[in-house]
Amino acid sequence: MKIKKILIFISDEGFGHTVRQRSLIKSILKNIKYCEVEVITSKKILLLKETFKNKIKYHHKHNLIETIKKKDGSIDKIKTKKMFHHWLKSKKKWITDMCKKYPNPDLIISDSVPQAFELAKKTNTKSINISHFTWNWFYKKHCKNTKSKDKVLYELDKSYNLADNFLILPLTPAEIIKKYKKKHKKINFVISDFDKVKKTKKKINCVIMDNGTKTLSVFIKKTIPYLKYIKNVNFFIGIKSYNQKIKKNIIDSKNIFPVNGLKKIHHTISLADFVIARAGFNTITETLVLKKPAIFFNEVNNEETSFNIKMLRKLKIISIIKSNEWGENIIKRINKFLTFELNSLTKKIKNKNFLSNGANQVTDFILKDLRWQK
């Protein structure tokens, strides 16, 4: 039987896109025979190699779009808009290069690289977009000049319209669902496999997480010296990107435990009583599926995290931390959370049932709807 070639284009933005596609690749390798998987991305290839080694192929290539952040972790709208204009200028060559390298793929999947669907059309290949948001939605919210026709938005729309199928994750904006209603199918959350961790500490456990683009780095650094004063809580913090002075401060503290690496800090969520993190989609997915209360930070100038928070507010399962509540003020903020919010949020989230079999649903879609043989 012919080996079918599956190309997976992963956005170079943050960590979540890679995590979702990693889970999907696991499901594909487990459930679909006679296929070869190749991923096209740049920054997170080492993470994928750590998981799959030589079971899949890798092509180190930037997929043209990502947000640009300021030193304080907020989105730099001017530089991010320039990134989109760079995408517009570069995508034609990108598509030409990809056509030469992959003239006859059997399936293209992306989360959520728009020009991948132009490649699919040129190579007469079926395509699937898996997303919580799309870059045209993001661009329209952040960068569009409403007084004139916008060439970037036009080309982004055109690229996404060429996708054959949209598999829509939970908490997706209504505008996206409406825009692609003739092509879309709703699926459940896609989440990493979590190691089973037994909670052995008698104290309350809190995981403080930075995200893949280091949005919270500045806030966490100035907060670490004050965590030792919250003696009834154990804190787990990722230390990979911090200097030796901060690492020593953590190691010398009796109630702060260092966690080395982004993957390990995500796995630590399973032993947490609550989480403090940016309101990114991947972190929200993990806290909801694992039923962990969270205090979320809304990234400045980011419509995606603002929308995520809006949706969680509707479900009444969110607490917020503001910019001025880090540093020394973290003591007051956490004590308030422990006294007035933790028990209520824990009960509410435990009564919710968020399914996480999205990766298997995508595989089933490939096998049944695209009529591939198992």
Image: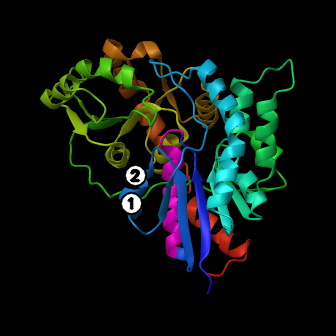
The foreground one among 260 and 290 is 260
User: Picture coordinates of residue 215 (x, y %)?
Assistant: 45, 27
Specify the amino acid type for callout 1.
Thr
**Can see residue 188?**
yes
Q: Residue at x 82, y 35 (%)?
A: 154
Whether residue 22 is in magenta: the answer is yes
> Is residue 256 left or right of 92 when viewed as pictured?
left
Specify the amino acid type for callout 2.
Leu
User: Picture coordinates of residue 236 (x, y %)?
Assistant: 28, 36
Secondary element under disc 2, as helix, strand or loop, is helix
Q: Residue at x 47, y 66 (%)?
A: 56
The structure's colour scheme is rainbow
User: Picture coordinates of residue 83 (x, y %)?
Assistant: 62, 29
Instruction: Check residue 303 in the rendering and tell me which mark sits there, or answer none.
Output: none
Q: Residues within 10 Å of mark 2 (few under 14, many from 20)?
A: some
Q: Residue at x 52, y 63 (%)?
A: 25
> Is residue 363 left or right of 338 when viewed as pictured?
right
Whether residue 354 is in magenta: the answer is no
The foreground one among 221 and 298 is 221
Mark 1, residue position: 51
Q: Residue at x 50, y 39 (%)?
A: 14
The foreground one among 6 and 300 is 6
Asked whether the beta carbons under mark 2 and mark 1 sit within 8 Å of each other, the answer is yes
Secondary element under disc 1, as helix, strand or loop, is helix
Residue range of the region highlighted in magenta in the rendering: 13-30
Task: Kindly give the residue lying farthest to the bottom in the view shown.
Answer: 1
- Cα distance in 3D space between marks 2 and 1: 7 Å
Whether 241 is drawn above or below 78: the answer is below
Instruction: Check residue 47 in the rendering and tell me which mark sits there, or answer none.
Output: 2
